[in-house]
Image: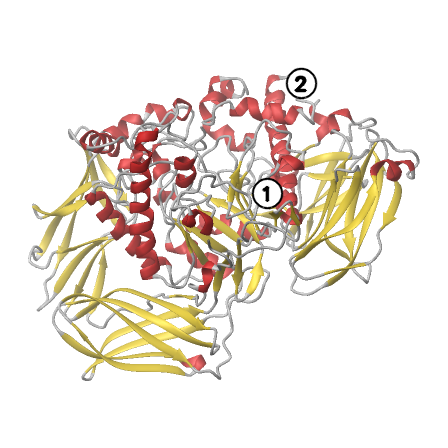
Amino acid sequence: MAVRGDLGGLIVSVLLCCCCCCVCQVSSGLSSARSTLLDGKWKLSNSNGSLQLAAAVPGCVHSALQQQGFIQDPYFRFNDLLYRWIALDNWTYTTTFPFARLRKQKVLLVFDGVDTVSSISLNGVVLGTTDNMFRRYDFPVTGLLKDGGNVLNVSFLSPVVYASERRKAHVGAPVPPECPPDVQKGECHVNFIRKEQRSFSWDWGPSFPSMGLFRGVRLVTFDLLHLVHMSCIPLHNASSSTWTVQVELLVEAAQETSVLLTMSLPELQAELSVQSRFLPGRNLQRFALDVGAGAEVRLWWPRDHGERHGYRLAVRGQRDSDLVIKAESKVFFRTVELVQEPLEGSTGLSFYFRINGRPIFLKGSNWIPAHSFQDQVTPAVLKNLLQSAVDANMNVLRVWGGGVYEQELFYSTCDELGIMVWQDMMFACAMYPTDQDFIDTVREEVIQQVRRLKSHPSVVVWSGNNENEAALATDWFHIPASLKPRYLHDYVTLYVDNIRVLVQKEDPSRPFLVSSPTNGAESQREGWVAANPYDPLYGDTHFYSYTDDCWDWTKFPRTRFASEYGFQSWPSFSALQPVSVKEDWNYSGSFSAHRQHHADGNQQMLQQAALHFRLPNSSEPLQTFTDTLYITQVMQAQCVKLQTEFYRRSRSEIIQGKGHTMGALYWQLNDIWQAPSWSSIEFGGKWKMLHYFAQSFFAAVLPVGFEDDDGSFVVVAVSDRHHSLKLQAVVTVYRWSSQDSVCTLRSDWLLVPAGSAVTIFRRPVAALLEGCERCTRRTCLITFHLEGGDKRQEGPSNHHFLDSPKDAEGLQRPNITAEVRQVGQNLTVTLHSAAVAAFVWLDVGSVPGRFDSNGFLLVERNRTLAFSAWRSTSVAELTASIKVTSLRDVY
């Protein structure tokens, strides 16, 4: 996401088509290796010693200060500004730990996550420094440890000061941007530090330049061998239809050691034994374990496309009679191809993914860090967000390049749930230096992260950066023409000559894109920076427009792949209440302005909403505020719905060379704090209206309705199924003034091929309304759904407004009542409505959980919904908490 402000028939994946992955989870280490955690309570102090406190590791300075009562919740009101001093100071973590020396031991001190710039010393001896949040750091400490107490210090430099000093020391052309826009209230020169880029602020998040040991610290002791890393990539030979598992071992040897290695997949009756020699120091060795041609290999499939079977890989190393290597992993077989080839009727190239030889429409969103402080991203938070993605029928998430390479649990959960991952490298919306020390640390970062993640079948594509090609091509930073060749050279140096080369060397199994958005193969042909990286005839696009009417589908780009698009909304009042006070509950107040980090964002939301809805006008200020929060969510949900449906119905058509859309990833899934943003899930996990809408617009079978240029109402049947469906569209017309339908029309039966979008119903609007008791655009609305041969409904119901709801004639207050009941172990809510109601929203305040549907059009008199609670609750609590709002209730 931005901080706003002659290839012929190339199929890129032909070079990469033998692509699969495994998850290597070492179940037990080497028999001679032992890992001792140094996590737990450390001491923390600032530069002058005026603050001294206990601090948890893993953790960070801000978390420690809050936990020990030195500061309030950093997210409370304006604390992001009040606590700026924390990131401007230097801090030291200290621990004392015992150690009992055993004979011939080699000892490594391992830091799995250091944020970011530090000097590390043990017993007064400096071991080294760190300058990259995305690297693991190992230090040999064999001769420095003492029997008894050992003192370990990690002294952090202010990341803000460090970035500024690096900028001052830089020789040559500036590396823009210098600072974020003022509205973001952030810090400068973030591109000079290898740290989570959004930590200096973004247009949806605060500035909290964190410091600390955000992942574990451990001592590894061994006599012979230490397994540093293990990964496995199954490679598919298309010509022989056989598999080979490439097993990679990175081993640290204390002395030269010969080992008989045995690798086996028992379930597939595949085994390899080889004599291997490890020299003192680091040894990287790769082995090819062939799977017999007769083996029936079960594949890993994305969500809703098949099962995700895995196989146990066992690795054993024998030295004489001693077992010195013992590790196990889970291997998942799958192939991935990024297909860029000519399309009939177009001068451009396709851009879509084939998984296991099958074209897959990618449906999902973009993932940002779930918290400003990584130590507070708990397993429960991760699993809830990822399950929410699956429950909204998503099959992909893009890990955005301004955050972090996520923790292991994120990827293993995606493997389990069938969520594909588009993995950006951590570069976003900026130019970057190409000084040798910067390149060196980036190279090590890329090697480590690719080795760590390439075993996961969920990861289907690497991308070098977020929007940096577009920034350079369209001159975001007003670079003088005379200097542009220099910046183009530096761009290619970093992302092509280094990152791309390293990724493809480490992982030959997946496609690599230099940027997003990009024209892909066409960008490469143009020297890696296309004249227009947003060209809908190639690659993926990012598209945002807040002034155009989002109900006008002709404003959307008919792109090959939409990897970013969206609209802002505010979170619920229950999300804002804990971080605000009564005086803040005003949409035009200082708190609302402070939380909005996108220029003119608050006004843009109201302007877009006012195009089709009446804005709240209660005489009670608090009611007006909460109603305004609601109307922004209505606007966002409807806008993203219409845009996503446009992309889904464009998959099977080429119009003026454009179309064949095969991906829709709206911006963004989750929030990092309680503030307006493009997210569909609030900070804390509560679903916004948009996320409920996503359940429908990402459904495997979906009816999409729109009005064509000739004034006809059209229904397109979209299917992600692997088999053809015989379907019929059922179109029902209602008056706004009555819950009884006016008329129902049915289309002819039509065979909808697998993986296609087909027009199934078309009728001129004027004729449709004339035949339905002389309805008008303002008095009536349309609902529609698809049915199969047995009259069973396929996919969700949908709706189409013939005119803006603000101009609807006959829309009445529905006076909805809600009755909560306990049905077995479940809670249900039955709604009783006196009138047709649009965008019916059930809010239960701070009770965590979600409904099976929400934000819907209610045309029936009664409707029962299920509520899934995320903690123990009761009928009484839910009854007291529930509030029902519809569109007519807010004016």
Q: Could you tell me which residue is drawn at 66 percent across and 36 percent down? A: 554
Q: Which mark is residue 618?
A: 2
| Quadrant of the image containing the C terminus | top right
As drawn, is 72 to the left or to the right of 851?
left
Note whether 472 is above or below 381 in the view shown.
above
Asked whether 333 or 243 is in front, the reply is 243
Residue matched to label 1:
691
> How far apart in space, not on screen, are marks 1 and 2 (Cα)?
27 Å
Note whether 635 is above or below 451 in the view shown.
above
As drawn, is 283 to the left or to the right of 330?
left
Circle 2 packing at 10 Å, graded few (<14), some (14-19), many (20+), is some
Circle 1 packing at 10 Å, graded few (<14), some (14-19), many (20+), is many
Q: Which mark is residue 534?
A: none
Q: Position of residue 388 (x, y in %)?
A: 55, 49
Furthest toward the top, the residue is 619
Q: Circle 1 sits in a helix, a strand or a loop, which is it?
A: helix
Of the residues shown, which amino acid type is indicated by label 1? His
Please indicate, yes or no, whether residue 371 appears anywhere in the rendered image: no
Q: Position of residue 230 (x, y in %)?
A: 30, 66
Q: Could you tell me which residue is drawn at 81 percent across and 46 percent down? A: 762
Labels 1, 2: front one: 1
Asked whether 469 or 602 is in front, the reply is 469
Note whether 724 is above or below 706 in the view shown.
below
Q: Position of residue 572 (x, y in %)?
A: 56, 32
As drawn, is 707 to the left or to the right of 247?
right
Q: Circle 2 sits in a helix, a strand or a loop, which is it?
A: loop
